[in-house]
Image (cartoon, rainbow, N blue to C red):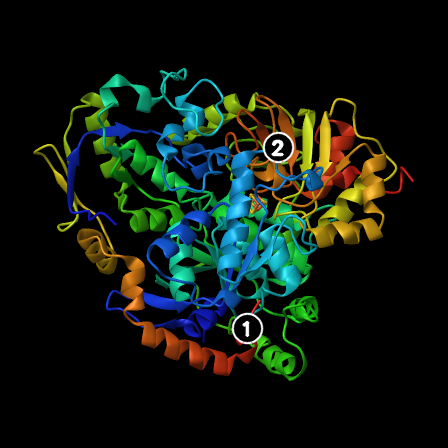
C-alpha cells in the first residue's frame, strides 16, 4: 500500500447525505476481475446522461453538467467533501478503488458506512470524520472559493483550511501507523502466525465440529 | 453478565493490541464471484495460500442467469467472473457451488441451508448482507475485498469490538404483518445510519415467535439500519433448523455442540450501549416511497410532503427522492401503480416467503398493466421444495415467471433489471437510485405485499386481502 502522510489539495463538495455505494459505482460495473479501471464509472448515474456498458471510456460520453464533479472549477480536486453516512450500502471495495483511481486521496464526511470506512483504510484512501459544524465550514469555504487549499495531516490528525483554522480528527493508532508507513496488513498479521496457530488449536479442541472442512 | 455478542467475541478474539484492536478468528468464509477475484490475485501475487480452504465455501450467485441457465452466461465479463471463482476454488481446494450445482443459490440462503452457518461461530463474506446469518446466534458480517484476502491468508481479521444495540420487539404481529415490515419500520424509525458501528441483537416475544426464515429477513436488513451485524439468541427454533443440515455436526459432536449453543443468549441484565423497544401490535405493512430504506410509510398512509420537514438537508434529499421516484406528496400509497414485481433476494426468497406470496396469488391473475412479475427462489433447494409443494404452478397460473435461483433483480448484475422510469414492487433490501437498473424505481415490501401488488396492479393493504375469496 502507498503510504499516506500528508496531503494538500483542493476539494469537491458533494452536498448529499447517505451517498450509497451503488451511487458511487453501480453494480453493472463490478463484473471486472481486475483492480483497475473503475474511475471511468465513478458516480456513473450522476456524472453521465447516457447509460453505458462496462468498459466504456468516460471521454466522449455526455456529461451531466449539473453534477458537482463535472464543474470545471473542481476538476483539479483531490479531496471529496461529503455528508453523513457516506459510502453506506454494499461492501464493494470497488467504490473505494473508483474514488482513488479518479484521483481523490481523501474523503471528509461527518460519518461513513462502516464497511466503506474499513475498505478505505485498507486501500490507502484516507477517510476523515469531522463534526457536522466543521463540515459546514468546509463546505462554505469550498463553495465560496473552489481554490481553497485544504491540508490533511495524518501524523498530527488535523485538517487545515488554507492558512486558517485547523480541526482535529480521530484515527486508530494502529491504523494510522500502518497508513503512514504503507504497511502490508496481511504481512503484519502473519508476523504472529504462531499465535494464530495456537489459538486455532485451542479453539478446535473446544469446538471440535468447527475443525471439519466444508 | 455478558451479551450474546460479547460471548461470541470472547471466544474468538486474541492477540490484543494496545489500541484495543484484536485478531478475530474466523470460522467460516463464504466467497462470491464479485468481491473475491482481486483477493485471490493478491494472495497469488504475494506467494500466499489460503490458511484453511476447508473453512471456505465459494458460491456463484450475483451474476448467474435466472432463465435458460443451461445456455451459460451470455455476458463475457460475468462469465469470466464466475470462471475465475471456479478456477480459484479449484486451485486452492475450496468447495465451489457453481450455477449447475444442486446446492447453488444466494450465499446467504445457502449457508444456513447447508449448515455451514452454525450458532456461536464467526462468519464473514465479501457481501454486506452477511448480517443475515446472525439469526443463528453467530457473529456474521460483511467485509471488503482487502479483508477477504486477509481472511483467506490468515483466517483472522484485525478489528475492534462493535457497540451493541438491543432491539426488543414484544407482542404479536397482526395478520398480514411480517418480519419484513418489522425491520422496515425499525429502519424508518432509527434511520439508515441509526445503528452505525453497532451489532444489533433482536429480542422479545415477537422475535421468539418468528421462524428462522423471518429472523433471517430481519438480521439481513440490519445493514440497512447502518449496523454491520444482527444477532438473535439460540432457542428451540434455531436448534430445530440446524439439526441434520449437511454440514451440521452429528452424533456425539451434535450433543456437545447443542449443549454449548443453548447458552448463546444474552445474560439477564447484560448491558447494551443502546436499547430500543417496538410494539409488534403497532406495526403495519410497510412500503418504501423513496431512495433510501429509511424512507418508508405504512401501506394505508400517503407519500410524505418534504416541505413538512424542518431540517433543510433532509427536505432537499426527500425532494430529490420524490423526483427520482416520480411521486407527488400526499399521494395515497394504494394509488401507486406498478410496472414490475420482483419476489426474491437474500431478504425474502426462502420457502416461507414463497408460500406467503403463493397464498396471495393462488387462483388469481396478475394485472395486465404489470409487465413482468417474477419469482426468483433463493436457492435451487428452495426452488425444488416449492415445486414439490406446487407453488410454481400457483405462480405460473397467475402469470408470474418462475426462475432459477440467484441475486437477479436485487442488484441487476445479470439480465434481470428495470428500464429507466419503471416502477417495481420488490422484496429485496435496497431502493437506492439505479439499484435495480439505471433509472429504475424500487418500492421495498414484503412477499405478500409484492404478490398482492402484482394482482392489483397497484399497492394494496394485504391485511384486507381474503385468501379464501379466489379459491
Ligand atoms: S440478493 Fe441482493 S443483497 Fe442479497 S447478496 Fe444478492 S445482490 Fe446482495
- Left or right of residue A108, residue B53 in this image: right
Residue A193 seen in the figure: yes
Above or below B44: residue B316: above
Q: Residue furthest left?
A: A163
- Left or right of residue B365, residue B299 in this image: left
Q: Answer with the quadrant where ligand 1 appears in the image.
A: top right
**Which of marks 2 and 1 precedes in the sequence?**
1
Q: Secondary structure at mark 2?
A: loop
Residue under label 2: B415
Q: Position of residue B129 (x, y in %)?
A: 53, 50
Pointer 1 chain: B
Ligand 1 lies under 8 Å from the Cβ of mark 2: no
- Which residue is found at the position 36% from the left and 48% from the top? A119
Q: Secondary structure at mark 1?
A: loop
**Res B154 → quadrant:** bottom left
Viewport quadrant of the N terminus of chain B:
bottom left
Q: Position of residue A201 (x, y in %)?
A: 43, 80
- Camera-side residue of B165 and B344: B344
- Camera-side residue of A44 and B170: A44
**In 3D space, how far apart are the residues under numbered discs 1 and 2 (Cα atoms)?**
42 Å
Viewport quadrant of the C terminus of chain B:
top right
Q: Residue furthest right?
A: B471
Q: Position of residue B74 (x, y in %)?
A: 61, 34
Foreground mark, 1 or 2?
2
- Left or right of residue B156, residue B93 in this image: right
Crowd tier of the residue under label 2, counting other residues whose Cα lies within 10 Å: few below 14, some 14–19, many 20 or above: some
- Camera-side residue of B65 and B23: B65
- Which residue is found at the position 64% from the left and 51% from the top? B105
Residue under label 1: B264
Above or below A183: residue A202: below
Residue B307 seen in the figure: no
Amino acid at each position: 500500500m502507498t503510504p499516506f502522510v500528508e496531503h494538500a489539495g483542493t476539494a469537491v463538495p458533494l452536498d448529499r447525505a447517505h451517498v450509497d455505494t451503488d451511487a458511487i459505482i453501480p453494480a453493472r460495473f463490478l463484473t471486472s476481475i481486475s483492480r483497475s479501471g473503475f474511475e471511468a464509472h465513478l458516480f456513473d448515474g450522476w456524472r453521465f446522461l447516457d447509460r453505458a456498458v462496462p468498459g466504456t471510456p468516460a471521454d466522449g460520453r455526455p456529461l451531466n453538467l449539473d453534477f458537482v464533479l463535472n464543474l470545471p472549477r473542481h476538476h483539479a480536486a483531490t479531496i471529496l467533501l461529503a455528508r453523513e453516512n457516506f459510502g453506506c450500502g454494499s461492501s464493494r471495495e470497488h467504490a473505494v478503488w473508483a474514488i482513488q483511481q479518479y484521483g481523490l486521496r481523501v474523503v471528509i464526511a461527518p460519518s461513513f458506512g462502516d464497511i466503506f470506512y474499513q475498505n478505505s483504510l485498507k486501500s490507502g484512501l484516507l477517510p476523515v470524520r469531522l463534526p457536522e459544524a466543521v463540515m459546514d465550514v468546509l463546505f462554505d469555504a469550498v463553495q465560496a472559493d473552489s481554490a481553497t487549499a485544504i491540508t490533511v495531516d495524518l501524523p498530527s490528525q488535523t485538517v487545515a483550511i488554507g492558512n486558517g483554522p485547523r480541526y482535529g480528527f480521530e484515527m486508530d493508532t494502529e491504523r494510522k501507523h500502518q497508513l503512514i508507513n504503507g504497511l502490508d496488513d496481511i504481512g503484519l498479521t502473519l508476523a504472529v502466525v504462531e499465535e494464530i496457530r495456537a489459538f486455532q488449536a485451542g479453539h478446535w479442541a473446544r469446538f471440535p465440529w468447527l475443525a471439519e472442512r466444508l | 453478565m455478558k451479551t450474546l455478542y460479547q460471548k461470541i467475541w470472547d471466544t474468538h478474539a486474541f492477540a490484543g493490541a494496545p489500541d484495543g484492536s484484536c485478531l478475530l478468528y474466523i470460522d467460516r468464509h463464504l466467497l462470491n464471484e464479485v468481491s473475491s477475484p482481486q483477493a485471490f490475485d493478491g494472495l497469488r501475487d504475494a506467494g500466499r495460500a489460503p490458511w484453511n480452504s476447508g473453512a471456505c465455501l465459494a458460491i456463484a450467485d450475483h451474476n448467474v442467469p435466472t432463465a435458460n441457465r443451461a445456455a451459460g452466461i451470455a455476458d463475457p465479463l460475468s462469465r469470466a467472473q464466475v470462471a475465475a471463482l471456479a478456477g480459484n476454488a479449484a486451485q486452492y481446494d475450496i468447495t465451489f457451488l457453481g450455477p449447475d450445482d444442486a446446492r447453488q443459490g444466494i450465499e446467504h440462503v445457502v449457508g444456513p441451508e447447508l449448515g455451514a452457518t452454525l450458532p456461536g461461530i464467526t462468519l464473514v463474506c465479501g457481501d454486506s448482507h452477511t448480517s443475515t446469518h446472525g439469526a443463528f446466534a453467530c457473529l456474521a458480517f460483511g467485509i471488503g475485498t482487502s479483508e477477504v484476502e486477509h481472511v483467506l491468508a490468515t483466517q483472522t481479521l484485525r478489528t475492534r469490538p462493535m457497540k451493541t444495540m438491543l432491539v426488543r420487539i414484544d407482542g404479536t404481529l397482526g395478520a398480514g404483518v411480517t418480519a419484513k415490515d418489522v425491520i422496515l419500520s425499525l429502519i424508518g424509525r432509527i434511520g439508515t445510519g441509526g445503528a452505525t458501528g453497532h451489532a444489533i441483537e433482536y429480542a422479545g416475544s415477537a422475535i421468539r415467535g418468528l421462524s428462522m426464515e423471518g429472523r433471517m429477513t430481519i438480521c439481513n436488513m440490519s445493514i440497512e439500519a447502518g449496523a454491520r451485524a444482527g444477532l438473535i439468541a439460540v432457542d428451540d427454533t434455531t436448534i430445530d433448523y440446524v439439526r441434520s443440515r449437511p454440514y451440521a455436526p452429528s452424533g456425539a459432536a451434535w450433543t456437545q455442540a447443542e449443549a454449548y449453543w443453548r447458552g448463546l443468549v444474552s445474560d439477564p441484565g447484560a448491558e447494551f450501549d443502546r436499547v430500543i423497544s417496538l410494539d409488534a401490535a403497532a406495526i403495519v405493512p410497510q412500503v418504501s416511497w423513496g431512495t433510501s430504506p429509511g424512507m418508508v410509510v405504512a401501506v394505508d398512509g400517503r407519500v410524505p410532503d418534504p416541505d413538512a420537514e424542518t431540517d433543510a438537508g433532509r427536505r432537499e434529499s426527500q425532494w430529490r427522492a420524490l423526483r427520482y421516484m416520480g411521486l407527488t406528496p400526499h399521494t395515497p400509497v394504494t394509488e401507486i401503480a406498478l410496472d414490475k414485481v420482483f419476489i426474491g433476494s437474500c431478504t425474502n426468497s426462502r420457502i416461507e416467503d414463497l408460500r406467503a406470496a403463493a397464498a396471495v396469488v393462488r387462483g388469481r391473475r396478475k394485472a395486465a398493466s404489470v409487465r413482468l412479475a417474477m419469482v426468483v427462489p433463493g436457492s435451487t433447494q428452495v426452488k425444488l421444495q416449492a415445486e414439490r409443494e406446487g407453488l410454481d404452478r400457483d405462480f405460473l397460473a397467475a402469470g408470474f415467471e418462475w426462475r432459477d435461483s440467484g441475486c437477479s433483480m436485487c442488484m441487476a448484475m445479470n439480465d434481470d433489471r428495470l428500464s429507466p422510469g419503471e416502477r417495481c414492487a420488490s422484496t429485496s433490501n435496497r431502493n437506492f437510485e439505479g439499484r435495480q437498473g439505471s433509472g429504475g424505481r424500487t418500492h421495498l415490501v414484503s412477499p405478500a405485499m409484492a404478490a398482492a401488488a402484482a394482482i392489483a396492479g397497484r399497492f394494496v393493504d394485504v391485511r384486507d386481502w381474503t385468501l379464501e375469496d379466489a379459491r
